[in-house]
């Protein structure tokens, strides 16, 4: 059995606990939070030990896999320290807040031989898996030419004021793009491959009294494959719907929306091909992918079989994300993604 430790006992930690408990390859050994009551509460719930500092996690030989579920600015530092302490890491998104951080992370994984899995769990949703399978097997659809990603959500005062790290460039590193839209951007890259260049607008259209980061963005993404990507996202709406992505092939069009996959005929009518799992213990918009993501990683580590969502898999969308911020901050200029 691999022994996991969840670091950061906030909102997303419950999905990690559920995921570890659901695999036959792992067990929750400990939880860690610098707020002792949060660690104690989680430890009681999962029947494991509570730790109150990351140093205790690093020096604990009984911990094999560290789950980084902390605020964004701590991700890379914590992941690198855990790798160097001989642990594997399941890191929440975003991967990194700068190109320098990204480089350090890649080097540390290479240098230590330990593994990093990134929590981009929407790839595990049933509708997305079905779409991937269709693309691999049905040559009649032709080549992919375009991909659209749309995310229209609500994030408000209560959300931003509950935890002080949100809405700040230094601690969240951005908002709409790196926190909410990263999954949508990741799906676009999952199907279209790495991007070549990007042109983005970022703005704080509504929440400018309470956050300094962006609540709205749009972008044009030119993929290396020649596919054209169009993205729009905002945190300023009155409610949140699951993200939508659309794939435009030479002879077919597919839309993943409202947690289901549709094929769109030339008249614009939609036929449902696959619905996602209905039971999602977390927020609906998180999807149902965490247990599968965690299962795949633990299985790979324990049995050496199957695949998992690796740092290399997460890199294309991570690099576009950083380029979108660079482009937006520079005033919507074309920005090379792999510079
Ligand atoms: N994959 C997803 O769909 C998804 C969904 C929600 C959140 N997330 C990600 O999960 C991460 C955490 O988000 P959240 O909403 O759970 O945040 P949160 O603020 O609810 O929880 C963060 C926790 O980390 C703890 N913490 C802070 N510094 C620490 C330290 N040095 N050592 C140990 N614990 C520390 C805090 O006390 C807090 O309990 C973020 O990266 C976020 O983007 C991912």
Image (spheres, grey):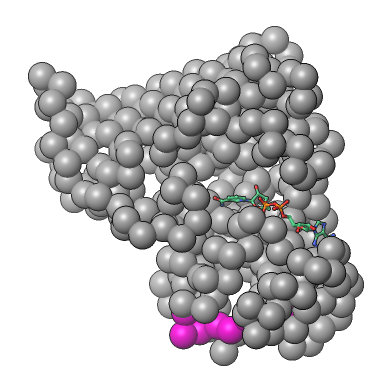
Ligand 1 visible in quadrant: bottom right
Identify which residue is drawn at 77% across, 71% down: 39
**Residue 29 versus residue 146 in the image, above or below:** below
Q: Which quarter of the figure is the C terminus placed in?
A: top right
Residue 4 position, x and y percent, is 65, 78
Q: Which residues are magenta?
A: 23-31
Residue 6: x and y in percent read 69, 70
Q: Give the quadrant of the N terminus.
A: bottom right
Q: Is residue 81 above or below residue 250?
A: below
Position of residue 1 in the picture relative to residue 103 (left or right) = left
Q: In the rendering, at what x and y percent does residue 67 appear?
A: 67, 67
Does residue 313 appear anywhere in the picture?
Answer: no
- Position of 35 relative to 103 (above/below): below
Residue at position x 55%, y 63% in the image:
15
Q: Is residue 85 left or right of residue 328?
A: right
Give the residue displayed 58% in from the left and 71% down from the top. 17
In the foreground, 242 or 218: 242
Residue 330 figure quarter: top right
Which residue occupies the foreground of this view, 250 or 297? 297
The residue under the point 41% across, 72% down is 306
Is residue 122 part of the magenta span, yes or no? no
* Vertical placement of residue 75 versus 154, above or below: below
Please identify the dominant SS of the magenta region: strand
- Can you tell which quarter of the image residue 177 is in? top right
């Amino acid at each position: 059995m691999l022994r996991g430790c969840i670091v950061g006992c906030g909102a997303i930690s419950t999905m990690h606990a559920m995921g570890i408990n659901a695999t036959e390859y792992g067990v929750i050994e400990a939880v860690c939070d610098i707020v002792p009551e949060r660690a104690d509460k989680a430890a009681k719930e999962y029947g494991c030990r509570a730790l109150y500092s990351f140093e205790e996690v690093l020096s604990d030989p009984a911990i094999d896999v560290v789950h980084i579920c902390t605020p964004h600015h701590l991700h890379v530092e914590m992941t690198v320290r855990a790798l160097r302490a001989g642990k594997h890491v399941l890191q929440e998104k975003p991967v990194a807040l700068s190109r320098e951080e990204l480089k350090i992370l890649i080097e540390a994984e290479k240098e230590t031989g330990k593994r990093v899995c990134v929590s981009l769990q929407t790839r595990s949703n049933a509708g997305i898996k079905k779409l991937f399978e269709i693309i691999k097997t049905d040559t009649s659809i032709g080549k992919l030419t375009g991909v659209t990603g749309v995310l229209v959500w609500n994030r408000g005062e209560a959300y931003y004021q509950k935890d002080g790290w949100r809405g700040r460039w230094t601690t969240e590193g951005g908002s709409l793009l790196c926190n909410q839209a990263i999954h949508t951007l990741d799906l676009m890259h999952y199907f279209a491959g790495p991007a070549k260049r990007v042109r983005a607008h970022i703005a704080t259209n509504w929440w400018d009294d309470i956050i300094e980061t962006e609540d709205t963005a749009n972008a044009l993404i030119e993929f290396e494959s020649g596919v054209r990507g169009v993205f729009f996202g905002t945190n300023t709406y009155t409610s949140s719907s699951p993200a939508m992505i659309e794939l435009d092939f030479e002879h077919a069009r597919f839309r993943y929306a409202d947690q289901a996959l549709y094929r769109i005929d030339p008249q614009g009518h939609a036929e449902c091909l696959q619905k996602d799992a209905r039971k999602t213990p977390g927020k609906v918009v998180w999807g149902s992918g965490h247990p599968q993501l965690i299962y795949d990683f633990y299985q790979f580590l324990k049995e050496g079989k199957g695949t998992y969502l690796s740092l290399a898999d997460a890199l294309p969308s991570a690099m576009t994300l950083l380029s979108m911020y660079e482009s937006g901050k520079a005033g919507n200029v074309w920005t090379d993604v792999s510079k």
